[in-house]
Amino acid sequence: METQLRILVADDHPLFRDGVRNVVESTEGMTVVGEAATGEDAVKLALELRPDVVLMDIRMPVLNGIEATARIRSGNDSIRVLMLTMFKDDDSVISGMKAGASGYILKDADKEDIVRAIRTVAAGEAIFGGDVASRLIAYAVRPASRLDRFPELTDREKEVLQLMTEGCSNADISRKLSLSSKTVSNYVSAILNKLQTPDRASAVQLVKQSDLPSP
């Protein structure tokens, strides 16, 4: 008897979960072992059920899909996560990969593409939709960032700081990076502490000063 790939579907839209379940259950060798409507439930169910693959949306209540992915991978790195979402902006794609996702495809993908992506990720390989792959290539070959001059910052903290230098508020950063407002506030506090600056304006000024040529 063929081994069944065990799939957990995490999405806050019931109709979309129904559609994905139909795709999975109509495919030989796959079965849905659970469904989650929030990021928090996705983490809990993933660690309890230990599916082969979690199909994860990004925009999820309580805990977003990127944070949920990071927690799942931290709790059990044998569980593969495939981001299945509407969002294809650079921030979402890169954040998903950094969180530990093994693949990233869009919700408008054909059934065959979704099935192929699930099997690829379950086999321990990575897969990305066409548009997503292009964005990853562009990211990989981009010039070194001025924020690389601050090695004490994590990659995520550099992302937050870069948005701060662009004039983004915490609410803007929360939306762009799909993070909760509390998480963004914690990142900003960590950045100010590591850079030893009293406020965000001083941190931004420090970055701008790093662009000036040495005397």
Image (cartoon, rainbow, N blue to C red):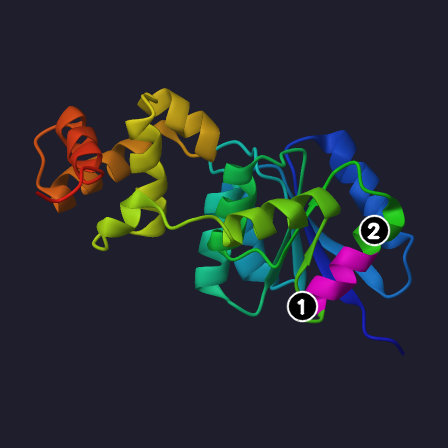
Quarter of the rendering occupied by the C terminus:
top left
Q: Most prominent secondary structure in the magenta stretch?
A: helix
Q: Secondary structure at mark 2?
A: helix
Residue 148 percent location from the top left of the image: 29, 51
Residue pictured at 35% horizontal, 28% vertical? 181
| 59 is higher (above) or lower (below) than 120 | above
Residue 111 percent location from the top left of the image: 87, 47
Residue pictured at 13% horizontal, 29% vertical? 202
Residue pictured at 32% horizontal, 21% vertical? 169
Residue 49 percent location from the top left of the image: 61, 61
What residue did someone put label 1 on? 125
Left or right of 108 in this view: 159? left
Quarter of the rendering occupied by the N terminus:
bottom right
| 67 is higher (above) or lower (below) than 75 | above
Left or right of 101 in this view: 127? right
Q: Quadrant of residue 214?
A: top left
Tally of numbered tags = 2
Left or right of 109 in this view: 169? left
Q: Amino acid at mark 2?
A: Asp
Q: Amino acid at mark 1?
A: Glu
Of residues 55 and 193, the one nearer the viewer is 193
What residue did someone put label 2 on? 113
Determine if the magenta segment contains residue 118.
yes
Left or right of 132 in this view: 30? right
Q: Secondary structure at mark 1?
A: loop
Residue 189 percent location from the top left of the image: 19, 36
Classify mark 1: residues with Cα within 10 Å, few (<14), some (14-19) or many (20+): few
